[in-house]
Image (cartoon, rainbow, N blue to C red):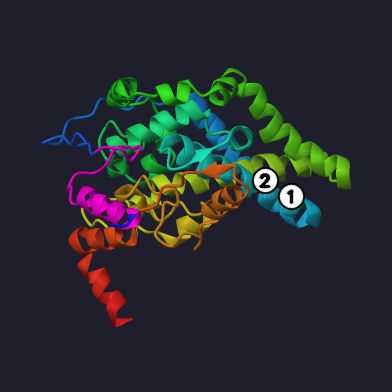
Amino acid sequence: MSPRAGLDEKMSSLEAETVPVDSLGLAPIVAEQPEQEVKRPPLQIVWRNVVLMVALHISAIYGLYLLPQAKLKTLVWTLVLYWLSGIGITAGAHRLWSHRSYKAKLPLRILLALLNSLAFQNDVIEWARDHRVHHKYSETDADPHNAKRGFFFAHIGWLMVRKHSDVKKKGQQLDISDLLDDPVLRFQRKFYLPSVVLFCFVVPTVVPVYFWGEDIITAYIICALFRYCAILNATWLVNSLAHLWGMKPYDIRINPSENSLVATVAMGEGFHNYHHTFPQDYSTAEFKWFLNFSTLFIDIFAFFGLAYDRKSMPKSVVEKRRQRTGDKSEMALRKKE
């Protein structure tokens, strides 16, 4: 038997399990689902966060007004920053550190940590911990952005209220020693706020002002605030829209869905039914580079030897899972096409 055939046989055996895998894709776990609806404690609004979010979105709206006045180089720079900050979340905090779906050498880990500070969505250790809780206890009160509480809560509302006690309790029970043992992540956590000020706000503003004479207010509003608000909402759409609307070709029993719009704005993170079915796959999608710039980024660095041990699901395993738990009506539609 060839090594590849042996791998396919082992993966097919694993695929026969009917329970979801854990956030790292290493062992099956059973998410704790309440037997009956539990009355939740009253929401405790964090008014500081509400004010900050409202102010940020008002600034972003003003940024839309300023777009026609900005220089072309400024608009290009903003798009580059959007892409880079997104990569800090998708290829970094999500696929590398949350799921360990591939490995990265020190230079790439440093780059991804810097890009994560550019994105300003909490340091990697906190982001990855919350995301592991999200996968292990998806759509329960232990899920930080439980989509069963509605679109608004899953999108942004969860950041405006105190965390449910289950989120804190389950988060404390997770083993995140791998994150705490990474010197790059420890350094980022220690100097997180200064790194955010520098990479999320100062550098995006200074570059267009210094190099091509952009107005400083225009540069700050568009390149820093508008871009920051845009990548935040793109990330939040993965939690909200991709958990509430779309096709379910791999597992019809779960909320996460395939959503091309989310995949486009979130650089490949919208193929969510696949991702929650096979969280160990570094591509988070069956079709690799299709609407998936994050996979392309990882593959480019793999070509240069800085990314390695990329985990992928064998096609045979994906197809068997699709036949067993996928949306049969969606598969019939594909055959007709």
Q: Which residues are magenta?
A: 3-27
Res. 249 in view: no
Give the residue displayed 81% in from the left and 44% down from the top.
Answer: 208
Give the residue displayed 32% in from the left and 51% down from the top.
Answer: 256
**Image-based side of 64 in relation to 244, left or right:** right
- Measuring from the top left, give residue 229's x and y in whole percent: 58, 42
Q: Quadrant of residue 323?
A: bottom left
Q: Work out whether 259 lies above or below 184.
A: below
Residue that protrudes farthest toward the left in the picture: 35
Foreground residue among 259 and 244: 259
Foreground residue among 293 and 234: 293
Give the residue displayed 34% in from the left and 53% down from the top.
Answer: 3
Residue 6 magenta: yes
Name which residue type carries label 2.
Answer: Leu
Q: Please name the residue that numbered disc 1 is placed on.
A: 77
Q: Work out whether 152 lies above or below 46.
A: below
Q: Work out whether 29 lies above or below 321.
A: above
Q: Quadrant where the N terminus lies?
A: bottom left
Mark on residue 81?
2
